[in-house]
Amino acid sequence: MNPKEPLFGKTLTQLEEVRSLLGLPSYTPKQIARWLYQAHLREIQAMTDLSKEVRRILDERYTIGTEPPLHVSTSLDGTRKYLFPPGIESAYIPDRDRATLCLSTQIGCKMGCRFCLTGKQGFGGNLSPREILNQYESLPERDRVTNFVYMGMGEPLDNLDAVLESITVLTSAWGYGFSPSRITVSTVGILTGIERFLTESSCHLALSLHSPFDEERALLMPIQARHPLKEVLEVIRSFDLPRQRRVSFEYIVFEGFNHSSRHVKELARILQGIRCRINLIRFHALGESVILGDGRALKPASEEQILQFQELLNRKGIRTTVRRSRGQDIEAACGQLSTAKLRGNLHTEPRLFT
Ligand code: SF4
């Protein structure tokens, strides 16, 4: 017998296909969506406004398909890193009156950024919309989440169909009903993906920048050779985005590498005409030193160097913020997510959920 297909993660259009396939009444897709995304149901038989016969027909071929986390690590600062089956990692980051969930979109990643642990892990596969959304639905702190960032393991625009479907479920009235302004999708800069993302969603975009100079960026990010920064910025510039839609640039500050006055000047030049902000991020060393192609080693810049760089950028009129490091002690900070690493540590702090 074939395994039952999960209902969770399907859009209303896909639930309509289920309805049509099974010959169910026209109102069932909306009812099922409400049970899945608003009532958080775990059993088809509990969908009490569907007739017993409809539930029986559904139950024969479908299951709900949510899965609880296998493991959690808790940071001293309250950040929690979760491991969901079959090896999906997410970070829950509470911060005063908001709580952000950092979602993964792939197991591992193909992009190979030199400063990232996931990049070292290689690629293990794309996540389905169900697997992306399950990181929210099955999170113990689900009801406290206010914001989402697609910044976990993987390159979201390399799995764009699934990412857009998950956003549809998060933002639709029949789904979770979040405003798109609560969602930020981060990318290394895949040209066609950015175009499609900006056209087909209303969420914020974050681009990993890390240097305004092509040769320097190429040392950090292999994607620069295939999708040069200049072309990526041209695509972003070609969109007349509404004020409430934010474009930000992620910038990890490496000591002696990318925070000079030359960098400030060049950033001001290349970002001219784009309403944006730069997020400065502290580099979290990966346990072994990273030596770039030109022989230089990547090291974290000091707090003072980061603040000086911020001051120079602000003076040039570029709105610049410094992202507070969260979850560093449990390796949940930016660039540190890696299931391979987490699995290695499982025996030290297992916690099973029922
Ligand atoms: S930084 Fe993002 S895109 Fe780059 S290797 Fe890591 S997960 Fe992939």
Image (tube, grey):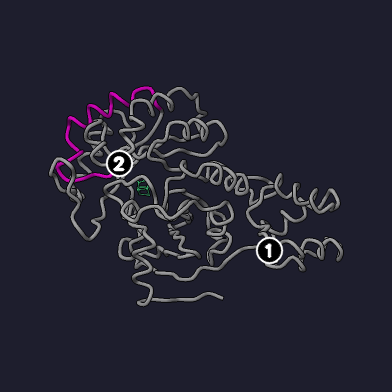
Q: Which residues are magenta?
A: 252-274
Q: Is residue 35 left or right of residue 276?
A: right
The quadrant of the rendering that contains the C terminus is bottom right
SS for dot 1: loop
Q: CA distance from mark 2 to mark 1?
A: 47 Å
Mark 2 sits on what residue? 251
Q: Residues within 10 Å of mark 1 (few under 14, many from 20)?
A: few
Mark 2 or 1, closer to the camera? 1
- Where residue 307 sits in the image (x, y, percent)? 23, 44
**Considering the numbered disc 2 on the image, is that residue within a helix, a strand or a loop?**
strand
The answer to which of 256 and 95 lies nearer the viewer is 256
- x and y percentages locating residue 317 in the rendered image: 30, 28
Left of 218 or right of it: where is 93?
A: right
Q: Is mark 1 within 8 Å of ligand 1?
A: no
Quadrant of the frame with the N terminus: bottom right
Q: Which residue does the image show at 28% across and 27% down from the upper left? A: 268
Question: Which residue corresponds to the image point at 55% horizontal and 57% vertical from the top-left?
Answer: 131
* 137 lies above or below 233: below
Question: In the current view of this chain or complex, which residue is farthest to the left?
Answer: 295
Kind of residue at disc 2: Tyr
The image position of residue 324, as x and y in percent, is: 33, 52
Inspect the magenta stretch and tell me whether residue 265 lies in it: yes
Callouts 2 and 1 close, C-beta under 8 Å: no
Three-letter amino acid code of the residue under disc 1? Asn
Q: Which is nearer the N-term, disc 2 or disc 1? A: 1
322 drawn magenta: no
Left or right for 62, reference 104: right
Q: Is mark 2 within 8 Å of ligand 1?
A: no
Which residue is labeled 1 in the image? 2
Quadrant in the rendering for residue 270: top left
Instruction: Name the foreground residue: 49 vs 302.
Output: 49
Residue 38 at x, y = what percent? 68, 57
